[in-house]
Amino acid sequence: MFALADCNNFYASCERVFRPDLIGKPVVVLSNNDGCVIARSNEAKVLGIPMGAPAFDFEALFIKHQVQVFSANFALYGDMSNRVMDILGEYTPEMEIYSIDEAFLKLQGFKYVDLHAYGLNMQKRVTKSTGIPISVGIAPTKSLAKIANKIAKKFAQQTRSVHIINSDEVRIKALKWTKVEDVWGIGRQHAKRLCALGVNNAFDFAQMDKDWVQKYMSIVGLRLHQDLNGIPTLDLEEVQPKKNIATTRSFDKNFTTLDELKERVTTFAVSCAEKLRKQGSCCNSLSVFVHTNRFRNDLPQYARSIVVQLPFASNSNYELVKYANIALERIYKLGYHYKKAGVIVLDFTPEDATQLTMFGNGNPNHTAIMQTIDKLNALYGRQKIKLASQDLKRMWVMKQEKLSPRYTTNLKDIITVKC
Amino acid sequence: MAVLKLYDTITLDIYSALSESVLELPFIEGGISAGFPSPALDFIDLKIDLNKHVVKHPSSTFYGRVKGVSMIDAGIHDGDLLVIDKSLEPKHGKIGVCYIDGEFTVKRIFIKNGELWLMPANSAYEPIRITPENELLVWGIVTHVIKAF
């Protein structure tokens, strides 16, 4: 059996742990730079605030309904997530942390355990110990656990936030309740095609002919089909090193000149290089994109991305910055107001297994320089040591006007007692 | 032991416990003497990790900073650091961090004849009787108080 434990409205719930006055009131959390809504409490959902809503479009509504708005406080969310996961980890030796707010627990060898009671205990303990309410779905397979979780969340009162699929009867009822487009792993395109065939819910899909599923939805669809039929097919996934890394930002104001964009792209490339070194990878290619503000219909629109191949695998700031800027120069056009840019590094090879090429290998001195830079930045704070082509004055300009209070550094600093 | 500031209010700052850092102080059984090197030196492997003693449940432990004097007779003074465990059940006699009428407060929980009271530990302050009109949330239970002298 599998359990899926999922935090309810996670970011909003994190804010509420320390602001109990906001329980029962609408809360939204904005993305980096306070751009758009990335999390909503149930009350905010009821007000019709959609996911991804641009904050400025909804400002009047926020005020009218006294919606509490927060800038994303990822230090807080990360810490609260770790707490939730630590407690969940005590319930099984095998767990897959699927995202910041949900985890699959494999419950093998629990034959003589009342799993429903086990789920209730888990739900209660996490909710009490961390203040973050969770929902738990338990079922013979992962995709069914996902559905069970949705039911637990939707009917929180009746289920006490825990739902278990432990018979075929319950499974069929759950599948019939689930719209085909809401099935985990069925994308929008497939959902459209299935609906056209009269396959409206997960039960219809599970009843479909295997051969059809394999033919039109490949082996991935077939696995899901089996999993929904109660045959455990999808197993816990091991944490893999990331396959690509992106650093992208919306700007606090529109940029028009190449120099302004170059500074940003340089900083993003440096950030990608840092992340690559952290996981011990080098990239063989990188992609740069820029685009204008899609919500400004009054301005000319432009969006473009480009992939460049590196001559050799690298994770050096210098190399990545060099190629990111070459890429940017190719796609930059004068006369537009740019709102967002990003660097994505792709096609990784492990740091210790890079191929040497006949010509133009990376400068071996870079490795030592990068190690030194990483050490200094770890010691003196992020981005203390920069390339000269980065804006040295720009320290941390993310727009976070509604950030909930955060960090101090250590105990010594706080216990200054004045008498 | 380091702390991460998570939240603050007028009366209480809330910190998150960070217990990865381990401050180990050697604990030498039998005391320390000068002169002939003790053969016991080979066995200095017992260490005291305050984190383990003060933070029993890292996942549910938060820190709070005290502001005010209503609990001085319980040894809780202005500026002290509270170690708060959210996983513990509120019981008669325990010191709790409560959220009442829009703010966090620290008081002793008192249950008498089916009535719930928040008791200060300072004769200058009145006990607070909790009525159905109060919105009370027992946020966590204080397990330790840390002071600097």
Image: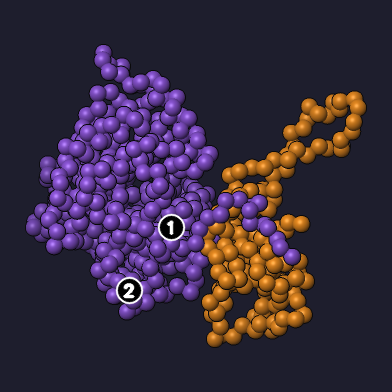
Query: Mark 1 or 2 closer to N-term?
Result: 2
Is A80 displayed left or right of B123 in the figure?
Answer: left
* Residue A219 in view: no
| A282 w.r.t. A25: above or below | above
Discs 1, 2: same chain = yes
Q: Are marks 1 and 2 in contact (CB under 8 Å)?
A: no
Spot occupied by residue B147 in the image (x, y as percentages of width and height) = 72, 58
* Residue A305 in view: yes
Find chain A in the image and tell me its colour: purple
Type of residue at label 1?
A: Asn
Q: Quadrant of residue A272?
A: top left
- Which residue sits at x=29%, y=61%? A36
**SS class of the residue under badge 1?**
loop
- Quadrant housing the C terminus of chain A: bottom right
The front one of B33 and A89 is B33
Q: How is the image coloured?
A: by chain
**Residue named by callout 2:** A62
Chain shaded orange: B
Alpha carbons under labels 1 and 2: distance apart: 19 Å
- Which residue sits at x=16%, y=40%? A331
The front one of A377 and A188 is A377
Type of residue at label 2?
A: Phe
**SS class of the residue under badge 2?**
helix
Spot occupied by residue A231 in the image (x, y as percentages of width and height) = 29, 46
| B56 w.r.t. A402: above or below | above
Q: Residue A73: which numbered mark, if any?
A: 1
Give the crowd class for mark 1: few <14, some 14-19, many >=20 residues within 10 Å: many
| A390 w.r.t. B39: above or below | below
- Which residue sits at x=33%, y=21%? A362
